[in-house]
């Protein structure tokens, strides 16, 4: 019998794995996974692991469960600990709670349902899109030869079924002027002032709602960072603003870039520094319905971005479902609910049994 879920989660949280420093957790997981089941097909790519629990076949669906090893750097006022129903620790909610369920599947002595079942423990999700190591996992020869029919990203969702995801685009918008001494500003051209009309327009942009499959996704564009100038007594000759544009399912990255270009309207230079695709909700997919029938009865749109978007770009329908407390993600003294962790396990176990009976999609 596997360890109680709280102890598994505590073990995961006790090994620090901020983005870029996942090596120790990856190595510890590799050792633990190999000791759990002899002869298990485990492949390491960078600081990420691909674990094959059930070989893909032509008869049953091939399911991928995905969970990222990395956490954001948050402040904690004490060690990893349990207080009542709450387990405190870095990544307890986002998303080591999801990893705990994946690890339990590996360590459980209960028979697995007869389906293709692959697990991805991967690094770099909280960083830039291009450094995310799920890409390495998806390039593995096994997944290229046997593309999953469906995937679950076990992101914290309070065991809510969150469908699709918003795309995200970060663009550096740079306004150019001309430097001068601040005692004689008329001799220069203040780049900060050049940006003011654009920033004012951004501040007045209303959210745009998009209803897709009965779910509401909200398009927003926000200035999140800004920098310019070389000294307190110098008129800035350059000033840049980071613009984060969140776009709905069905909108391409190219269309999102065009949207930002339209807002800038030629007044500044635009450099796209990071972009990630959106994903459709697949609300009518048989394996989505199976999750509902398994207890994930609350359905919502995923307003943020997750790797559901990356999977969609690979032609893999995917959803967000995980036991972590969503509101605790990236918070100081992050915690998650152990009762919610148990409930997530019950739903996931029932779903895997149902999934094995659905047959492969046509």
Image (cartoon, rainbow, N blue to C red):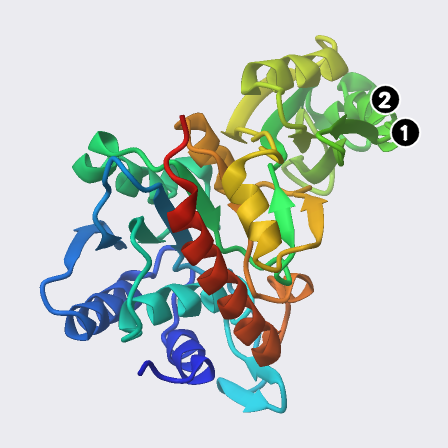
Q: Residue furthest left?
A: 39
Query: Comparing marks 2 and 1, which lies closer to the viewer?
Result: 1
Q: Quadrant of residue 197?
A: top right
Comparing 12 with 330, the one in front is: 12
> Where in the figure is residue 100, as x and y percent of width and height?
42, 70
Q: Quadrant of the C terminus?
A: top left
105 or 351: nearer the viewer: 351
Residue that carries the numbered disc 2 in the rendered image: 197
Q: Position of residue 229 (x, y in %)?
A: 67, 35
Horizontal and vertical percent position of residue 322: 54, 59
Q: Which mark is residue 204?
A: 1
Q: Secondary structure at mark 2?
A: helix
Quick one: 38 or 208, which is closer to the camera? 38
Q: Residues within 10 Å of mark 1 (few under 14, many from 20)?
A: few
Give the answer, above or below, for where 206 lies relative to 60. above
Q: Position of residue 186 (x, y in %)?
A: 83, 19
Q: Is residue 279 left or right of residue 9?
A: right
Q: Residue 10 occupies which quadrant of the picture?
A: bottom left
Question: What secondary structure is marked by label 1?
Answer: loop
* Pick the front one: 218 or 354: 354
- Label 2–label 1 contact, CB within 8 A: no
Q: Residue at x 56, y 51 (%)?
A: 291
Q: CA distance from mark 2 to mark 1?
A: 11 Å
Q: Earlier in the sequence, mark 2 or mark 1?
A: 2
| Residue pictured at 78% horizontal, 18% vertical | 187
Seen as rendered, the residue at the extreme top is 266
Q: Quadrant of residue 105?
A: bottom left
Left or right for 280, reference 246: left
């Amino acid at each position: 019998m596997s360890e109680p879920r709280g102890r598994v989660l505590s073990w995961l949280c006790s090994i620090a794995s901020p983005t870029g420093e996942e090596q120790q957790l990856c190595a510890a997981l590799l050792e633990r996974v190999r000791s759990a089941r002899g002869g298990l097909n485990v492949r390491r790519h960078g600081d990420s692991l691909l674990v094959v629990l059930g070989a893909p076949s032509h008869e049953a669906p091939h399911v991928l469960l995905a969970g990222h090893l990395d956490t954001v750097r948050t402040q904690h006022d004490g060690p990893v600990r349990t207080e009542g129903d709450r387990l405190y620790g870095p990544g307890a909610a986002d998303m080591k709670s999801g990893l705990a369920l994946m690890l339990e599947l590996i360590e459980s002595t209960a028979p697995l349902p007869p389906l293709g079942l692959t697990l991805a423990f991967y690094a770099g999700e909280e960083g830039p899109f291009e450094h995310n190591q799920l890409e390495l996992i998806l390039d593995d020869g096994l997944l290229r030869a046997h593309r999953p029919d469906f995937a679950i990203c076990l992101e914290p969702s309070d065991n809510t079924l969150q469908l699709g995801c918003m795309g995200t685009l970060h663009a550096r918008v740079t306004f150019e002027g001309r430097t001068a001494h601040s005692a004689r500003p008329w001799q220069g051209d203040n780049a900060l002032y050049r940006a003011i009309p654009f920033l004012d327009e951004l501040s007045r942009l209303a959210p745009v709602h998009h209803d897709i499959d009965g779910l509401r996704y909200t398009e927003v564009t926000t200035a999140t960072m800004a920098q310019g100038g070389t000294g307190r007594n110098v008129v800035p000759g350059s000033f840049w603003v980071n613009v984060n544009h969140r776009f709905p399912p069905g909108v391409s990255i190219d269309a999102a870039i065009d949207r930002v270009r339209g807002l800038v309207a030629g007044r500044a230079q635009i450099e796209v520094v990071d972009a990630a695709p959106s994903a459709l909700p697949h609300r009518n997919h048989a394996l989505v319905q199976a999750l509902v029938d398994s207890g994930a009865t609350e359905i919502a749109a995923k307003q943020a971005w997750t790797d559901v978007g990356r999977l969609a770009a690979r032609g893999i329908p995917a959803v967000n479902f995980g036991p972590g407390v969503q509101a605790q993600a990236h918070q100081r003294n992050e915690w998650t609910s152990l009762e919610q962790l148990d409930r997530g396990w019950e739903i996931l176990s029932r779903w895997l049994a149902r999934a094995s009976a659905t047959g492969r999609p046509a």
